[in-house]
Image (cartoon, grey):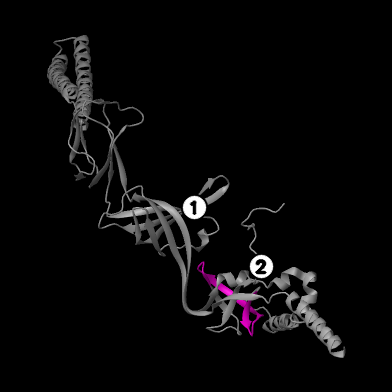
Amino acid sequence: MKKIVGAILLLSALGVAGYFFFKQPPKAQFKTLKVEQGSIVSAVSATGTLNAVVTVQVGTQVSGTLSKLYVDFNSLVKKGQPIAQIDPALFTSAVQQSRGNALSAEANLEKARVTLADAKRTLGRNRELLKEGIIAQADLDLAQTAYASALAGVNAAEAVVMQTRGALRQAETNLNYATIRSPVDGIVVSRNVDVGQTVAASFQTPTLFTIAQDLTKMQIDTNVDESDISRLKVGQTASFTVDAYPEQQFEGAVVQIRNAPIVTQNVVTYVAVIGVSNKDLKLKPGMTANVTVQTQRKDDVLKIPSAALRFKPKSEKEGKDDKGARAGKGSGDSAAVGARKQGDAREGRKDGPGQTVYLLKEGAPVPVSISTGILDGGFVEVVAGGALKEGDDVIVEQVTPGKKKSGMGSPMGPRF
């Protein structure tokens, strides 16, 4: 009987012990990454459009019908080379008419000069005759009037000659403008007209061709957010990719930062111009470029994953609800928090407001106060943090075993 009672008591004790053993919450597990020593690069990312450094829109200064086209898309042109011809018939006729008017005006000028010479001779002769008393004073006055009139006629004829010469030069200029020439050395990237088309020169000159002066040197006009524009400086190196060559990275440099703001839906950006070498002519105007500008680089520095700065142990987040859980095993965490505060007091926060990361030591998170520097998206520079060294395991995530993922239902469907 005593054996039965003892067995029952033993089984009860084992049952109670097993209940409390399996009722304990699973021990937390942590995902860690190594503290590294190496280089870190801070950069600014932006998008932009590739353009030729100098693009010239070629128009026409005279109206008429296009009779010839000498170039097409992608044609290489030299400065002064004819690229199109407007029908010159009307302009040739205008030149001939103006030339005839100029010749007539010059003939009238010669005639006026002859008349002036005759009036001058008559005036001189009458003055001598008046001294001898042969003619009256009235005759001398008439000769004086004729001379003045002839002189005025010469001046008027000279003015007409100047007018006709100006009209002739204008007609010749218009005839010259009928042949459209390239203003620069470059390549034709756009042609907007065809033979037989009538073009009209008015207050706004129509664009017939677009010529890129030199496609071996291009630029990217990027829109940089106002929060990042202060980090950019002229001369900084940049790298970029385009959709046409996704696996190739191109190089460039910041050549200009424009002060004019661009406001789009209350978002302020500034244009930063990136100079690009395009000797192999792979890049074409209008391509979209994804640009990364290197703003700062540091070598041989201590760096940690940026995810470590976002990690906090769940026991700290849960607050009062986890006081019981922290009373036993969490006592080490409380001591670590106190140690961290003392460490902060010793450091005096000389580098400004610090941050806290957690190292995994003996299966528990241990807080370490650090001051950070530049970041590159994946890693952050550690400026001050005496407890950190290369190879330490820094916690980036806490994982609780056995916890079901949110949003997962029963494979057999809902229970009723």
Q: To which residue does mark 2 refer?
A: 403
Residue pictured at 62% horizontal, 81% vertical: 360
The span picked out in magenta is: 354-379
Residue pictured at 74% horizontal, 69% vertical: 318
Q: To which residue does mark 1 refer?
A: 270
Task: Where is residue 53? Give x, y as percent.
Answer: 33, 51
Task: Where is residue 10? Give x, y as percent.
Answer: 81, 86
- Residue 261 vertical position relative to residue 60 in the rendered view, above or below: below
Q: Is residue 68 left or right of residue 386?
A: left
Task: Where is residue 304? Give x, y as percent.
Answer: 55, 75
Q: Could you tell me what secondary structure mostly forms the magenta stretch?
A: strand
Tag 2: amino acid: Lys
Please tell me in which quadrant of the rendered image residue 211 appears: top left
- Closer to the camera, 340 or 119? 340
Tag 1: amino acid: Tyr
- Residue 126 vertical position relative to residue 45 in the rendered view, above or below: above
Please tell me whether mark 2 sits on a helix, a strand or a loop.
loop
Q: Is residue 376 magenta?
A: yes
Residue pictured at 56% horizontal, 73% vertical: 373
Q: Quadrant of the N terminus?
A: bottom right
| Visible residue check, residue 62 | yes
Please tell me whether mark 1 sits on a helix, a strand or a loop.
strand
- Closer to the camera, 317 or 258? 317
Q: Find the residue positioned furthest to the front.
A: 1
- Closer to the camera, 145 or 395? 395
Residue pictured at 19% horizontal, 29% vertical: 175
Q: Which mark is residue 24?
A: none
